[in-house]
Image (cartoon, rainbow, N blue to C red):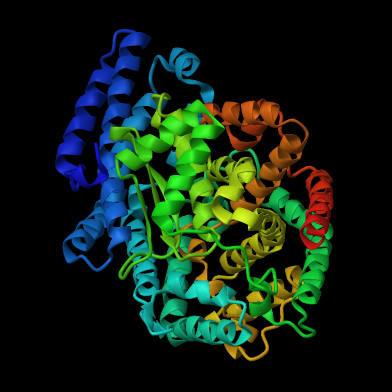
Amino acid sequence: MKFEDMPLVVPNVEKIKSKYEELGHELINAKDANEALKVIFKAFKLNDEISSNFTIIQINFSINTLDESIKEKQEKCDEISPLIQDISNKFNDLVLNSKFRKELEEKLGSYYFRLLENEKRTFSPEIIDDLVTENKLVNKYDSLIASAEIEFDGKVCNLSQLAKYMTNPDRNIRLEAAKKYWGFLESKDEEIGQIYDDLVKIRDKMAKKLGFSNFVELGYLRLSRLDYNAEMVEGYRNQILESVVPEVSKLKKAQAKRLGIKNPIFIDFNLDFKEGNPTPRGNINELVEDARKMYHEMSKETGEFFDFMTENHLMDLEAKKGKMSGGYMTYIPKYKSPFIFSNSNGTSADVDTLTHEFGHAFQGYLGSKIKNPSLRMPTLEACEIDSMSMEFFAYPWMNLFFKEDADKYKFSHLSGAISFLPYGVAIDEFQHFVYENINVTHKDRCAKWREIDRKYRPYLDYTGFPYLENGGFWVKQSHVFGSPFYYIDYTLAQVLALQFKCEMDKNRERAYKKYIKLLKLGGQYPFLELISKDHLRNPFIEGNVKKVIKPQMKYLKELSNKIFTK
């Protein structure tokens, strides 16, 4: 079914409650494990129906936050989602307490039951109103960011469109675009600070109602982190500090020299080459056709899937008025359809979307055969391995998008992937501070961010931007507001994607088979067990970060020599 034909249906809470109660009655009265299993599969189908309805509305709202009819539906979904969670959790309690649990665990896997027990720990009817409040606050932030209408270059731009000018070879244009971008956020700073303060307080309140000392542990469990904890994450952040920050500092020093700028400020590091960053040749529709060629050549599976996505209009890629910023992939289980959302702006990020989000979507497509919704997709850090690895598997086709600048793109992309790691862990460390110190002011939070930023990105200078000098940079990061503690997942995944990059540099075919195996495993195991099943190294073990960074720094040096001796 084409996306625009998918109906916008707000789930009916009373009907859903009745259906789950009926299934609960059937489960209690099941005569044996097979009968109980049939009831559980009916519940899976109901879950997929509800999830699809929520997701279709959420996508439409992302595409146009100004449509009052869709906005009303989204707000209704925000109100009822905790109620439906409560209803489904009551059914899950019956599954957990089934007299056939032993047999059901053998058939459905013990990890599924661990996930159900985790859901029980992270939810209570007592926090339903708080969850509704949390949803509304997140949407308030998203809508505020989407509301940006900034005049620049004779156009009215949103933040995603304005970002293009912040990579312009003309330093004056970069400066002016940055002033407009950060000026908008500064003008909304008080409102953003209040939204975040309200989010922090409501999350802490929920954590304490559920018996946690603060939101940190609850935040981890909400992300289904069942086999690692905050202490292990802290050790991992230290690996980045020790093994990656010095390498990134070298990259930035070389970048400034390459640009001929003696005293670079933060906006200068948006530019990789003096003559300009490599940009894709063609508009977004032409890039989609280039991507079609790439995926048909990559494998039969990727080619068929890309056709499925385009034929069913399962991508919305162009930036436009009222559209939320950023990009994502989501999945509509009823139609076995992934959906890709982004904001094209004429930069290399447009190609990154067609590789990164496609990697997510491809996993959703391959994982659709898994009947249990809870096991279809992995936890978020593993999801990001799927997407970030696809960016590297796409390297041989970059000449389609960038022509003679393909090597420049690879250099920019890989150096950017490595340079991202310190920022990703800085955001994580900041969030730990926030939820462990809930009563500090917005000004105090900003001051703490600046301190952490200096630690992980000592090469950044914000001269001329007092808002950033005072620590305002983090407010642009939507994950901090909508998905607490998620952001470090990108860095964990990047380290594992770099493992795939190291392996594909040696034997591409073998690395690709290993990648496909990972996608097909879906979310049938917790993170560390999942990567172990695919023979990937544990990033939390001391030294494993350095093992992937060292060969890729060598690869960057080789690329640099190739580019500058042409």
User: Is 103 placed above or below 426 here?
Assistant: above
Residue 116 in view of the camera: no
Q: Viewer-proximal residue, 454 or 270?
A: 270
Q: Which of 380 and 418 is in front in this view?
A: 418
Q: In which quarter of the image is residue 214?
A: bottom right
The quadrant in which the N terminus is found is top left
The number of numbered discs placed on residues in the rendered structure image is 0
Q: Position of residue 251 (x, y in %)?
A: 79, 65
Residue at image location 58% in from the left, 42% down from the top: 390
Query: Is residue 457 toward the left or the right of residue 360 in the image?
Result: right
Would residue 433 appear left or right of 375 to someone viewing this image? right
- Residue 105 position (above or below residue 204): above
Quadrant of the rendering where the C terminus is positioned: bottom right
Residue at image location 52% in from the left, 51% down from the top: 218
Q: Position of residue 350 (x, y in %)?
A: 49, 57
Q: Is residue 560 visible?
A: yes
Image coordinates of residue 393 in percent, x first then y, are: 62, 40
In the depicted view, which residue is nearer to us: 253 or 477? Answer: 253
Residue 431 pos. (x, y %): 59, 64
> Is 367 located above or below residue 289 in the figure?
above
Residue 131 falls left or right of residue 362: left
Foreground residue among 333 and 505: 505
Q: Which residue is drawn at 81% across and 75% down?
A: 257
